[in-house]
Every structure is written in C-alpha cells, then in structure tokens.
Amino acid sequence: MQDVRKRRGNSSHSTPDVSEDKGPQRKGQCFHFDLWLCLTVQNWILDFGRPIVMIILPLDWFPLNKPSAGDYFHMAYNVITPFLMLKLIERSPRAISRTAVYLCIITFVMGASIHLVGDSINHRLILSGYQLHLSVRENPIIKDLKPDSLIDSFELLYYYDEHLGHIMWYIPFFIILFIYFSGCFCSTHEERRITVPGWLLLGPSALYYWYLVTEGQITELFLLTFFAMVAMVMFQLHKGLSPDSNGLFLLYSFSVTLLLVALWVAYLWNDKVLRHKYPGLLYVPEPWSYYTLHIRKNH
C-alpha cells in the first residue's frame, strides 16, 4: 500500500500543470510554416483564382445552367479553409473556448455557402454583359427587365452575395484569427523572429488580405481587427510579453495589407465612376469593378 501511495504521489507531482502549459507566458512556439503555406496557397488558388478560372475556361465546358469550375473551387474552399483554421486553433499555446470556435466555424461555412450561390450567378451575369462597376438597377441588362419585380429579385441576390454572405463569412474568419493571435505571446526572445520561409510568405499573404479587404468590402472589419491586434500587443508589452514568430507574421501581414489598401485608394481616388459606385466615408473600390470598368472594356 505504501508503494502504491508513493507511486501515486510521484505521478501527481510529475504531471505537468495544464494551465501553465497553455498560459501566455510559455516559451514561444515554432513558426507554423506548413499551415501558413497551405492557407496562403489555397486562398490564392481557391478564392482569388476561382473567378479567373470561371472567365478563362471555355463556356462550352461549363454551360450557364450548370456549376462552373469556379463554383467547384468555391466548394473546395468552403471545406479546406475551416479545416485549416481548426488546425491552426489546435496549435494555439493558450486554452480557447471550443464553443466560440465552433460557432465561428459554423457561421463561416454558412456565410461562405450563401456567397457561393450568389457569386456563382453574379459572375455568370458578367459573361452576359453585367458590369460590376454599376449598381444593379443601372446595369443595361437588368434595368429593362419586365416585370419590375425581377429587378427586386436581382437586388436580393446581390444582397445575399455582397452583404449577408460577406458578413457571415468574414466576421468569424477575422474573429478566429484574432483569437489565435491573442495566444501568440511569450516572455522569451528565442522565438521572436520570423523565419526566412515566413518572410517569403509575408508578401503573398498580405497581398491576398488586400484582395479580401477590397473585394469583400470589409475595410471597417479589417481596421477593427488590426487595431485590436495593436492594442493587444501594447497591453501584453506592459506585462513583459511580446508576439512570437506566428504573432509577428500575422501582425506584419496586416500592416502590409493596410499599406496596400491605402495605395489602392490613392490610385483610384479621382475615378468618378467608382466614386459613384462606392459612396460613403470609406472609399475602397473592388478590384473586379475596376476590371469591368477599365480592363474588360478596353479588351
């Protein structure tokens, strides 16, 4: 009995404290190159590449009344992205509420699925002459539809695609990134450097976020997330903690994204057509609206 008690006592003393292992003051984690690489590559191919594939491939391969190649890309994105984000959360050095993560992932998948349907139809309208730089009622192929209730239906489709779908897609996306970022702090200095592969991924990652912010029209959400990250860094610095390599990668990616968005707005600042399409305090035109206005028209 004494031997059993000794073994139990030894095992209880040798068991690591889970809360300490998951706390923010642990040694900085290594750079998750595999996950960041997978996220960047699939974002570029399955998200940015899907409308390009939809336009480039011959129409005979994918008739207008059937899903296009871009739709299949979108379906793959809706499965792969939440899986990769769950894997990213699993590597967080701090304990995270599973309920919050599950709700974010469920909302993300639902919003991206709503966007899949609306975006599929809207991009097929482009092949029929729809101009993205104009509003729904100003488009030549829409404004002459009879009865007028059909125009209301297309406006509803636009709302699901560009508003509700984006809200339910991007808000949980950035919440998950911020939740993960909040755990990327350590009190040591060994892991506070971005590795060479991380620097190589920084440019493509930031450029994709620029596309996400401008095409998704989520400038306010991006700015809120970025400033929340900066505030988190300042708060943790007062506690003697600093971002590890993964936290720095996210912070630097968002910083470069902010610079790219500012340059994009400055470049199109005097464009009267896009100014009319995007009124309001924050003027951030969509790249595909720029494409239908200046590039597609000239070719």
Image (spheres, helix red, strand yellow):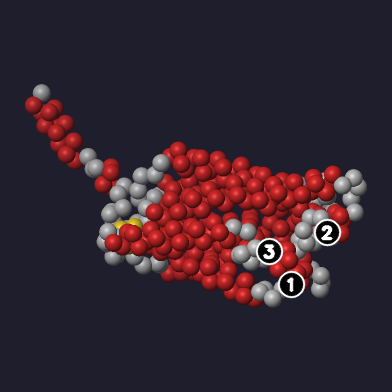
Residue 35 located left or right of residue 183: right
Choose top left, top right, bottom left or bottom right for residue 233: bottom left
Which numbered disc covers residue 139? 2
Instruction: Tell me if residue 137 comes above or below residue 1 in the rendering.
Output: below
Residue at which label 3 appears: 279
Q: Residue 264 at what x, y percent from top left? A: 62, 72
> Is 145 displayed left or right of 174 in the figure?
right
Left or right: residue 18 versus residue 269 is left
Residue 115 at what x, y percent from top left?
A: 67, 48
The outermost residue toward the top is 1
Depth check, mark 3 against mark 2: the one in front is 3
Q: Residues within 10 Å of mark 2 (few under 14, many from 20)?
A: some
- Image quadrant for the N terminus? top left
**Label 3 CA crowd tier, 10 Å (few <14, some 14–19, many 20+):** few
- The label shown at residue 272 is 1
For the residue pair 68 and 229, the one nearer the viewer reads as 229
